[in-house]
Image (cartoon, coloured by chain):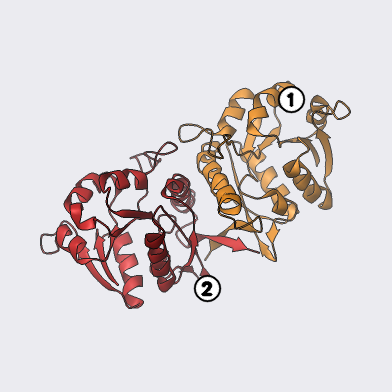
Chain colours: A red, B orange
Amino acid sequence: MRIGIIGKGNVGTAIAAGLSRAGHEVKFGHRDPKEPVAEAAKWGEVIILAVPHDAAVDTTKAVGSAADGKTVIDVSNALTANMELALGFTTSAAEEIQKMLPKAHVVKAFNTVFAQNQSTGKVGKEQLTLFVVGDDAKAKQAVMRLGKDIGFEPVDGGPLKAARYLEPMGMFMISLGYTLGMGTKIGFKLVKG
Amino acid sequence: MRIGIIGKGNVGTAIAAGLSRAGHEVKFGHRDPKEPVAEAAKWGEVIILAVPHDAAVDTTKAVGSAADGKTVIDVSNALTANMELALGFTTSAAEEIQKMLPKAHVVKAFNTVFAQNQSTGKVGKEQLTLFVVGDDAKAKQAVMRLGKDIGFEPVDGGPLKAARYLEPMGMFMISLGYTLGMGTKIGFKLVKG
């Protein structure tokens, strides 16, 4: 598939590496005028928003109608300067992005995984779970497939509203890895009997 | 240790089974006047509040000063009748219980684990992670030890405020198991590299 990745930071480049290895085509869009956001968004069959949440408003404006009818993956964790969640409980970053791109099929995924593990879907030899939530079944299936291609075990986590659970999980992962010093070689796995 | 378990539902009895097997002494306190809440709370060196969150106010009143200076484990997920989180983001069930028992050392744990897996800490042969958060280091260590005795791999998840992450995780687990039909033979594991 053709994946337009908006944002070229550690998250965007890690997911791009995993997708490229799996045989997908990737084009970046970011601040550099040589790689315009609008172009990558238009080119991609799937769009990944890999920018900090405080850039979401500007980014979704730049993406605009190029996202109409397409799957848009929100991978963000919306943090304050104090490393706390910026929003939650009655909404989520993913739902806010869906409001800004009403004709896109927004899917939340990858936010519970450190960038260091996003290109393989593994920590050591253990496969991590990719929790995928969204309201459009086909879009969600597409993202689960991309996750599987990278190396994750994808799990359908329900409607986009469930981003209200995934985003605190992402924040908890950040807290474990950075604040509590466990480092980034950790990740969530859903054990199944 | 002597563990006073307040509540004799599927969660309380599951944790009791795990703790008894590990050699700890357990006494229940609940609605039945033959097993008074106050007595179990007074007797226990550690108190486990295993009641639905909407019973938390009455239960903490019945426990009262018997909890002073003791470790109190909150295992609840605060749900509405519509199976959504009743509170979050700016507070958590655990923090509300700490306010009601200001001289106790409240620790949040077990809420991300289905009752069916609480007596063994495992799903099939795989060990689940017990995320433990709280503000008192000794209380947290005691709960981590109890979790290990049952069969979990305990992980220190930070201060009590991190219950704001654990409670959405618990809700997500309920959603995966019941709403999405994965069943209760599932659980979270923190993979470490």
Q: Quadrant of residue B72?
A: top right
Say whether residue A21 is visible: yes
Residue displayed at 37% across by 55% down: A107
Residue displayed at 29% across by 65% down: A13
The residue carrying mark 2 is A125
Residue type at numbered disc 2: Lys
Residue displayed at 35% across by 51% down: A76
Task: Give percent across and percent down for residue B140.
Answer: 64, 42
Q: Is residue B34 left or right of residue B110?
A: right
For residue A124, above or below residue B179: below
Q: Nearer the viewer, residue A143 or B153?
A: A143
Task: Give percent across and percent down for residue A12.
Answer: 30, 62
The residue carrying mark 1 is B63
| Chain bearing mark 1 | B
Residue type at numbered disc 1: Val
The secondary element bearing badge 1 is classed as helix
The secondary element bearing badge 2 is classed as loop
| Chain bearing mark 2 | A
Task: Give percent across and percent down for residue A59.
Answer: 21, 50
